[in-house]
Amino acid sequence: MDLAIALALQIIYGIANLVLISLGLAIIFGMMRVINLAHGEFIMLGGYVVVISTNHGVNLWFAMLILAPVVVGLIGVIVERLLIRHLYGRMVDTLLATWGLSLVLIGLITTIFGAQTATTISAPLGAVPIGEYSTSGYELFLIAVAIVLSVVVYLALKFTRIGLVARGTMQAADMASALGVSTSKVYAITFGVGAAVSGFAGALLAPLTGVLPTIGATYIAKAFITVISGGTAILAGTTSASVLLGGINGIVSFGIGPTMGEVALLVAAVILLRLMPRGITGRIFRKSL
Amino acid sequence: MIRSRETRWSLFAAAVGVVFLFAAPQVFELFTIINLTTVLALAILALSLALVWGYGGILCFGQTMFFGLGAYAYTIAAINIGETTAPIFIAIFVAAAFAAILGYFIFYGRVSDVYLAVITLTVTLIFYSLLRSTSGPEYKIGNALLGGFNGVTSPPLNIPGDPSNVLYPEDMFYVAMAALILAYLFCVWLTQTHFGRVMVAIRENELRAELLGYDIRLYKLALFAIGGGIAGMAGVLFANGIGRVTPDIFNLYNTALTIIWVIVGGRGTLIGPVLGAIALFYLTSGLGTQASINNNLVLGIILIVFVLLVPRGILPGVIGIWDRAQSRSKLLRSEKRMRRRRAPRRPEQEAANDG
């Protein structure tokens, strides 16, 4: 029984982890149909913000929950203004330009901070016992954060005026623009919010993984495949794909090993896309957010 | 007209390659020649992506996956078989077959091109983490230990039918250069055939090609598999050039490199990306000796600048300027003739034009 609970928690944590690392990408993809290849680097930047600011004596929780999203969000807005807005409607070129951005960010961080970062921060909150097993309190915290974050995004999209404008732009950008919405501003804010969420995820994961200039590469494969499997609906897509792929990943990881878990996740996603080429929300949950 | 010009230039490029094949060992030092094997392997990889992306419009972000599979398949087969002729074909087959299987899911699912890019990239990164985790003694295929992070030592090529007669590193240059020329001529030929023309039609307008009755899924799958096979052959040469295969072949940096070669050299040409690969290899290895400048930074800036300012790449840009200059001088000449003829009849309009 204790084993079952521990295992279930582990799988739920895997799902929460997928939600966290994919949500920022999903916001940008759902709104703008842009796959941001610099997504991993936004996560990486969030981690660096936390490590550097806590090394300078900033409170860890303040750095994680407020500083990292704000800083990375601002970087996102700047990137959108300087780079992405020149490429609207040219999807392939946007992909390539964000890949260039990804390399530039890796290069900049490596030049400034070196290829290795020695100082890391340990995960707070200690261990939580479950019968004869125990689980990390910080992982439980991350599960809670993933749930809260999803709920906040849902409420913001569903019940606020900004959310309404955002949904309108998502469905029919030209119509929204004809009704007086500045779609260019909506896109800039969207990109900023997406970047902020990615930075937030990076900040939360930094105590578990440490930071490296190239750490983005370890997240992007999973994040991309989750978002694409989910389809364009931001929340329904991300959560349904995370539950499905995270569940498969967790079970196979437990049975065989973590790498085979990743392989199983990928194979499942490829088969899923063969059956539903436009993702889960392209076929079912179509009207969802 | 254009077709004949293309063919003429391709044959010229191949002839330059043949001259280089025989001249290079006389001109360059031994170290450069040995190094060239690796460069030429990368050039063939660039060629395969130029074919798949530039001609087929298939945005493959994971061409290094077939390259790496070829390198691993060659190495593992060569260790197990004890000679290297059959492993070459095994490597090409493995890479092409994997491309065909992946391509089936992608093209028959009618996944859009951005999704295709992301899926191929993701599969490549999964290979990277999968092979990195094979460091224990239990991970072996036949006699070949996969070796995880450190990779496997690749046996050098031998003369067909004579396993003890192993090629020297400097002899590998001839093999690699000949492979590049042959692969290039094959690609040129392929783009001139009916199949190649249909591929270009699909690239330009998928729906129209389909309405004309072509099964675009099958065409794309075939081109993808051919591109995968060529990349696999490049992997064989790469394994010989470096002397070992490591999971790093599959990493994000190398994948980005292949894309940058094609962007810089130019989509829609075959020789452009080949030259792009060679030029960027020497640029990055030159930069690598200077610790202050980071390779990622330079490559990222190159990629952004080209996407924003030179989206067609260098070679098509140059051809475009050349064509415009040609047609302008032709236009000027005919205009002058016209003017001379018309001048006596319309003096007032001529004056207005000058003013």
Image (spheres, coloured by chain):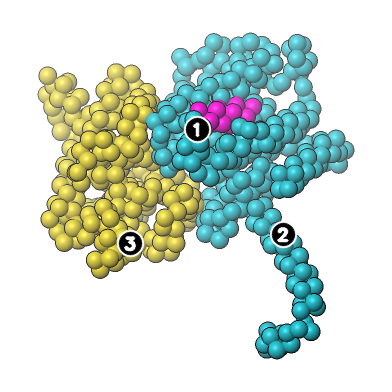
Which of the two residues, A78 or B323, is positioned nearer the viewer here? B323
Report helix, strand or loop for mark 3. Answer: helix
Residue B345 sits in which quadrant?
A: bottom right
- Between B73 and B218, the residue placed more toward the observer is B218
Taking the image as drawn, is residue A117 in sight?
A: no
Q: Residue furthest right?
A: B26
Prevalent SS, magenta region: helix
Q: Which residues are magenta?
A: B218-233
State which chain is coloured cyan.
B
Q: Is residue A41 left or right of residue A20?
A: right
Residue identified by numbered label 3:
A188
Report if residue B223 is visible in the image. yes
2 or 1: mark nearer the eye: 1
| x 33%, y 28%: residue | A275
Indicate whether B5 appears above or below B77. below
- Identify the image quadrant of the C terminus of chain B: bottom right
Which amino acid, mark 1? Gly
- Label 2 marks a residue whose chain is B
Foreground pick, B301 / A189:
A189
Q: Is residue B108 left or right of residue A233?
A: right
Chain letter for the yellow part: A
Residue receiving disc 2:
B322
Label 1, label 3: how far apart the Cα atoms are: 43 Å
The residue identified by callout 1 is B213
Task: Report crowding for label 2: few under 14, some 14 to 19, many 20 or more residues within 10 A (C-alpha).
Answer: few
